[in-house]
Amino acid sequence: MILKNLLLKAFYLLVFLFSGLYIIIYLHKKVLAHMQSRRGPLQTGFHGTLQIFSQILKSLLNWPKLFTSLQDLSNNIGVMISLTFAILAFLLIPLTEDIFLMNIEMSLPLCLSFIMISNVGAFLSIRKVKLNSNKMADLLDRISTVLIFSISLFISSMGPIIVSSSFNLFEIVRAQSIFYNILYQPLSFIVFLLSCSLLWQRLPLDVPLKDTYFNTDYLSTQTGLNYLISTISEYINIISLLILGTLLYLGGWNGPKILHPLIWTIIKTFILQVILLFLYTIIPRIRGFRKKINLSLAFLCLLSFLNLLIVIFLVLYLKPIL
Amino acid sequence: MKGIFRSLITVIRNTFKRSVTVLYPHDKIMVPYNSRGSIQLVVDPDTRKILCDGCGQCEKACPLKLISIEVDINNKELKSFCIDISRCMFCGFCEEACKKNALKMSFNYELTENDLSALEYDIEKLTKHARPKLRKFWKI
């Protein structure tokens, strides 16, 4: 009975993951194209709906490339790390009160750290690395930027944690049954989204490498299955960060009981994604390592500390009255 | 902040507007009125005969000397009219030189072929536009 229940939950999660992947990749291809007054995919299927499957098939059927890439393990390690940690982070996130796989006390910080590891892992392709090579420098640059932005990310997520007085995602959502966190913590919400944009590699912090580069290293050098896995892990990270955003600030599965709680989470994540798509196109790209440090340490950390002060004041003086 | 709001407005406008780019083989952009494509021989719609009498003015006017005309001296009729479109620069001098208005620059810009020799147009290709399509369909 327990096994059957677990399998059902896993099935639900997989269906959610794959459908979410499909919808988000299609949104990123089609809606972003229309925002930039392009047309996006049109050829395969109705308005390019089957484009994603064709691309997956194309990279899967790239057999000669696959075998050569399997031969040197060092190139595969980074990709596998990024995928496994992305899936682990997704499995820690509950979708509703019933649909979840793991209920760990420290689920929020664990989830965030897994996403960070998977983000760094994609750059770990250590093939033909010399001491003064570019790839090593890229890896170090990536690690440093992720660490810098992790400070603001963790401090901003301290707001909801203080309100619910727990690191558990269930408790954080249960604490929002009356007031959603976004109502009195908009600052922390903004900081969370901006520092997440580094982790999901979209604008305004999409370029993790040198200023002269226009795309990430592992997407331009890898082919076949490696490319597919690295892009899919990137999109899984986007989904898990979006759901985390809804759980922390938009009340998760809380909502009027007209609809199923799972549908509420889906609607909220979809709305968040659409808002973020607008943000990608509007905010200009932030370039340069020093500018990134300034943004993180001087601006985002300051905002999140301000938010923390407000939250502590509310918890100490207003919560007893309510 | 002002710039960001302005860009937000343009992005929202773009999403609901028709996109600038087109999917080429299926949709085509309207060609400007003054544009010049490949050359074509004008055919009289009533008599269905080519207006050109082979005076050779266009042959002289062509700066690259791409046009070659042969005329039957006895009947004073056009025997052959050849032009190498692969080297043509669409200057339109031949159209200007023609006194009978028998030459015309069309709007056809899709001139790719697999073979270079296919780009040497003869009378048949130059009067392709005037050929009745229905006859071709029913093979009459």
Image: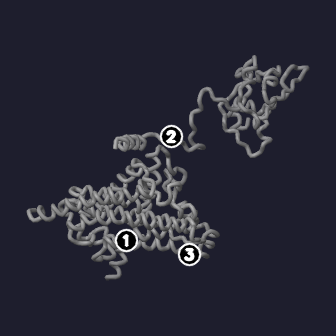
* Residue shown at 33% from the left, 70% from the top: A93
**Subunit bearing disc 3:** A
Q: CA distance from mark 3 to mark 2?
A: 44 Å
| Number of other residues with Cα within 10 Å of mark 3, as a class: few under 14, some 14 to 19, many 20 or more | some
Identify residue for label 3: A74
Q: Which mark is nearer the camera, 3 or 2?
A: 3
> Which quadrant holds residue A71?
bottom right
Residue positioned most to the right: B74
Q: Residue furthest top?
A: B99
Q: Which mark is residue B20?
A: 2
Between A262 and B21, the residue placed more toward the observer is: B21
Question: At numbered mark 1, what does the secondary structure look like: helix, strand or loop?
Answer: helix
Residue drawn at the location 62% of the way across and 73% of the way down: A67
Determine contact: label 3, label 2, CB under 8 Å.
no
Q: CA distance from mark 2 to mark 1?
A: 42 Å
Discs 3, 1: same chain: yes
User: Which residue matches tag 1?
Assistant: A113
The amino acid sitting under disc 3 is Ser
Secondary structure of the residue carrying tag 3 is helix
| Rendering quarter of residue B1 | top left
